[in-house]
Amino acid sequence: MSKSYNVAVVGATGAVGIEMIETLEKRNFPVGNLRLLASARSAGKELDFKGTKVKIEELTHDSFKGIDIALFSAGGDISKEFAPSCVKAGAVMIDNSSAFRMDKEVPLVVPEVNPEDVKGHKGIIANPNCSTILMVVAVYPLHKAAGLKRLVAATYQATSGAGAKGMDELILQTRQLLNDEPIKPQFFAHRIGFNLIPHIDVFLDNMYTKEEMKMVNEGRKIMHHPDLKVSCTCVRVPVMRAHSEALNMEFANEITPEEVRAILSKAPGVTVVDDPAAKKYPMPVDASGLYNVLAGRIRQDVSRDDKRGIDMFISGDQLLKGAALNAVQIAEIL
Ligand code: 25A
Ligand code: L14
């Protein structure tokens, strides 16, 4: 008999937690016992796994007895509070929050880019920020080919990034606005229905948001490229669950759009969708539900006199590759 692993999902009822459970099932992860953990609000409810009902339990410091792998997606405060008891119980923590990502002791892993970093873990492995995961999956193969020097990005981030509450608010406001009813932003800082909000996570002293600086710092750590220059504007858009990004890249060496297409069509985790004549390019509705990141609109940067600049547009499922799938892939490496 092949070995199986006892797995806990912390934040099981959340937008990401639900996808984690489904991804474990779909990818046939060798789960022995599955323990679903959430707050007291959800304790006693049941969720389905491989045709059987699993009862949700309240997360406590005793929850990790006998657990081999714990997938956390309940926010940074919960991760910080429960990491010590998880690690002490001998479970490896794969953490989707931002709590430990830049900790030198904690590997920050995207399996298509730096799977070998998993080996150095001391009990905790961090799952990167969703926009950063999608970016490095598409950009790292090009970096290996031509040496990425500078990246300027604008993101178009779905409401799923804020969890189920974010998606619910988009649906509610869209309905209210179409019915001429008054709206009241509750979860996002402003109206999200038929609007854009250039503000994700908190503002920092340098006038960037924390989300924008995650693209800068996490991208460098994952790609082992401390000198990479990144600037970024992160924008919330009224889209349900896939994030998109416009990327402008400067390389050390020349690279043509044909070469980019050839490299990316062989790259793990990427699907090239780039046929403008047939109106084919990445779009969030097409990326939703997919494991791969879609890459297209690949062209030589017309603002330069050389062939060292590339523009590209990507879309990827934020809840899957941006969160739950990447976490389960890390568990598969373990
Ligand atoms: O929103 P929270 O508090 O961070 O909670 C998110 C998840 O963690 C659980 C919680 O279980 C939920 O599964 N959780 C929270 N506190 C916990 C605790 N003390 C805890 N688990 C154990 N111990 P739940 O059973 O309380 O939530 C059930 C549903 O209710 C929604 N919800 C929670 N608090 C709410 C609320 N709705 C309204 N008002 C509140 N105050 C909860 O929302 C769930 O549906 P969600 O699905 O939107 O959760 C999304 C959260 O997921 C995290 N996240 C991390 N990375 C990402 C991400 N989301 C999207 N993409 C990512 N890349 C975020 O923390 C986000 O808030
Ligand atoms: O750091 O709201 O993983 O789109 C992921 C979702 C930060 C916010 C993270 C969003 C979060 C982001």
Image (cartoon, rainbow, N blue to C red):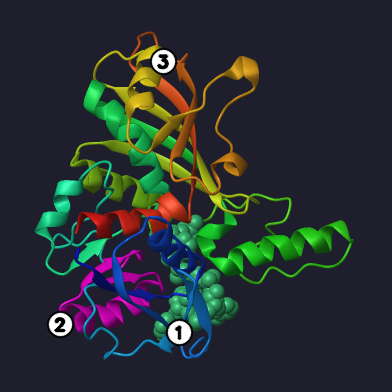
The label shown at residue 56 is 1
- The residue that disc 3 covers is 257
Q: Which amino acid, mark 2? A: Lys
List x then y, in percent, for residue 176. Answer: 82, 64
List x then y, in percent, for residue 236. Answer: 57, 52
| Beta carbon at label 1 within 8 Å of ligand 1 | yes
Between the C-alphas of marks 3 and 2, the distance is 50 Å
Asked whether 76 falls inside the magenta stretch, the response is yes
Mark 1 and 3 residues: CB-CB less than 8 Å, in contact?
A: no
Q: Which amino acid, mark 1? A: Ile
Q: Which amino acid, mark 3? A: Pro
Extreme residue toward the front, this view: 1
Badge 3, how many Cα within 10 Å: few under 14, some, many 20+? some
User: Looking at the image, is 198 positioned above or below residue 39?
Assistant: above
Figure quadrant of the C terminus: bottom left
Q: Earlier in the sequence, mark 3 or mark 2?
A: 2
Q: Which span is picked out in magenta?
A: 70-99
- The residue that disc 2 covers is 88
Figure quadrant of the N terminus: bottom left
Badge 1, how many Cα within 10 Å: few under 14, some, many 20+? many
> Of circles 2 and 1, which is in front?
1
Image position of 236 (left or right of 332): right
Q: Earlier in the sequence, mark 2 or mark 1?
A: 1
Between the C-alphas of marks 2 and 1, the distance is 22 Å
